[in-house]
Image (tube, rainbow, N blue to C red):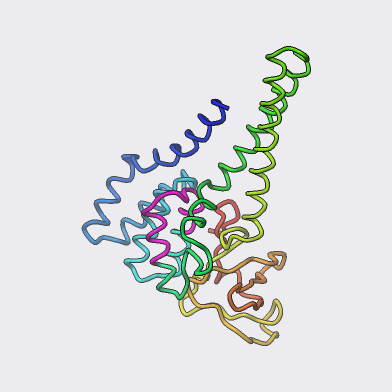
Amino acid sequence: MKLLALFFLLLQAAPAAAYDRSELAEFNDLYKTGRYEEALEGYRSVLAGDPANPSAWYNAGNALFRLNRPGPAVLNYSRAFILDPRSPDIRANLDYALKQTGQQLVPETVPAALHYVYYMLSDGELKAAALICFWLACLAGAAGFLLDGSAPGRAAGRAAAVSAVMTLLALAWLGGRVTTSPFSEGGVVVKQGGARMLSGPGENFKTYASAPEGRLVRILDAGDDAYYEIGLQKEGIKGWALKSEIELLTPKRTSK
């Protein structure tokens, strides 16, 4: 149990190190003097080499917001949030940017404290927690089998049971996020003026709705070469939008 507690403490502390990197200092100085385009290029150069840096995504979002580009700003803030959901600065700026586009980070029907706990760990941290707990369960179970009948064996058996429960909890938590989180399998409308939603993947299909710039959307189908099928959860509608007008949230799936 002490090992598990130490592991979760390390998970909590890990993302904070990214905010102390000196390589961002020069670009932050550019930002502070109002040279937002230059600062943005600097942050993008950092991200090219370190796409898992939440601080760089966050600072790029700040620059884009100052440049009056709400769609890309929401995209960058969201990517920062996915990587470091505990950062109060990231949460505050993402929520502010979402509200400028008619959205909000915490749904009205969800208590703020519950929402914070639900996103306390990133997806990567949950996967790591599940993997470590699984192997702890295996090792403790093996020890319990080998030491069967002894006091250490009984202790190992209890540790195996606790680790197994924590593995299932982490997997259930992760699975729940996949089905309920707007940041899972999601994207952002980045086209200025919004994206048209068509009844099918092609210009010959009827336009029946639109998704405004900065809107978080659910990616329902990415199989077409030129179009995504997207869903707007609040309105309960779906349609096809050009891939060039939507950016995926998860960095490994991004097109740029």
The magenta-colored residue range is: 78-96
Q: Who is closer to the viewer here, 169 or 59?
A: 169
| Quadrant in the picture for the N terminus | top right
Residue closest to the far left: 33
Q: Position of residue 39 (x, y in %)?
A: 31, 56
Q: Who is closer to the viewer here, 166 or 89?
A: 166
Residue at 70% across / 85% down in the picture? 204
Residue 67 is one of the magenta-drawn residues: no
Q: Position of residue 117 (x, y in %)?
A: 51, 51
Q: Exactly how many numbered labels are in the figure? A: 0
Residue at 35% across / 60% down in the picture? 62
Q: In the rendered view, would you say 216 is above or below 89?
A: below
Q: In the rendered view, would you say 249 is above or below 228?
A: above
Residue 79 is one of the magenta-drawn residues: yes
Q: Who is closer to the viewer here, 193 or 125?
A: 125
Residue at 66% across / 76% down in the picture? 238
Quarter-of-image position of residue 14 = top left
Q: Is residue 134 left or right of residue 82?
A: right
Q: Position of residue 167 (x, y in %)?
A: 67, 38
Q: In the rendered view, would you say 188 is above or below 139?
A: below
Q: Position of residue 187 (x, y in %)?
A: 57, 64
From the image, give the main secondary structure of the stretch colored magenta. helix
Quarter-of-image position of residue 162 = top right
